[in-house]
Image (spheres, rainbow, N blue to C red):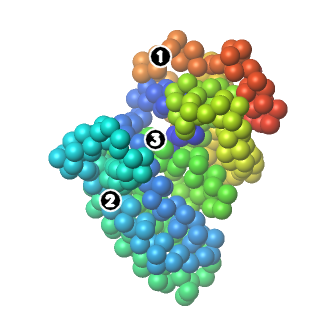
Amino acid sequence: MVISIGGSVSTGSSPWIDIVSAYEEVGVLEKELRIGESGLYSIASKIYLQNTPTKNEFSQVKRSLTEFGQQVPLPLRLAFALFTRLPGISAGIKTEITKYRSRKRSYDKFLPGFSLYSRRMLKELEILIGELKQLENTEKKLKIEKIMNEYIASLEKCICSDKKIVFDQLISPRLLFDEKYGCVASNVLSEVKIIVVRRDPRDQFIDLLLKKKKGYHLMQTSEAASLFVNEYMPRYDRMADMLDTCDHSNIIDVWFEDIFFDFETALDKVETFLGLKSRPNFFHTFDFSDASSKVKMHENDKFSKEVAFIKDNMKRHLYRY
């Protein structure tokens, strides 16, 4: 069984991965596996919705997945490290270096066989795209589901384990609740067990601000709060709607806050969903006391105006303490 546990930035998916990893029958890939960022899920969803990807779309996905398996050569890594520290280097050059690094993610290093199985899947996908005009709609759906599920299963085999395997960010919420294709992503990947981790957006915003993520620390906090709401409210609205209507046989949601305020209920939900039978006596990989400092951060008066703004706009997505 392949399990995807993921949340948006600073929503607490790592703590839930730590908790699930304490079960003897569960293994966790140590690194994130963001293959969806190649555009693969968009192409698969497009086929599922009876549309034909363009040659250019397929070529871009093929290039991305191929490069994801590679790593930046050591001499080049050292050169980049030195180069980016030079005084006066332009932001544009730094951006290009970052883009190059993100294309070569060393997936073959921690998931041996990644490139081999990716090339095999891409060949099958290319053949299917060429046959789409001759296929009935139902057959298109069945074929793309088969290709995607077999691909994910092949990546699971790379680990050589008889355990249930967690792939962090295999299906990130940003892609799962994409405005155009998110509605069918869980159908296309029907054999993956998907756990979406949510968090009170007031705490998420403060965490992003304090961790200096998304550039919020470089602007007025009121502006940062406005940008946060503009980005996340539409996405979280779609997420809530889809979670209400989707097939819950392969997708559920939990909250980071559940760990502290409704742990038994949330854990029962996860155990039932994943078929976990032997609960560990303790969750040795998760520090409950340390994580507790990340709960109810919004009660601090320092960001009271921003918290009030987020609360007024995102009432639907606040945690019910």
**Badge 1 is on which residue?**
287
The amino acid type found where label 2 is placed reads Glu
- Residue drawn at (32%, 41%) of the image: 84
- Residue drawn at (82%, 32%) of the image: 312
Q: Can the viewer see residue 237 in this picture?
A: yes
- Residue 183, position as x, y percentages in the image: 66, 58
Q: CA distance from mark 1 to mark 2?
A: 36 Å
Give the label on residue 151, or none.
none
Q: Earlier in the sequence, mark 1 or mark 2?
A: 2
The amino acid type found where label 1 is placed reads Asp
Q: Based on the displayed image, in which of its 4 quarters is residue 31 positioned?
A: top left
User: Does residue 12 sit above or below 166 in this rendering?
Assistant: above
Q: Earlier in the sequence, mark 1 or mark 3?
A: 3
User: Does residue 253 sit above or below 131 in this rendering?
Assistant: above
For mark 3, give the secondary structure: strand
- Residue drawn at (36%, 66%) of the image: 63
For mark 2, give the secondary structure: helix
**Badge 3 is on which residue?**
168
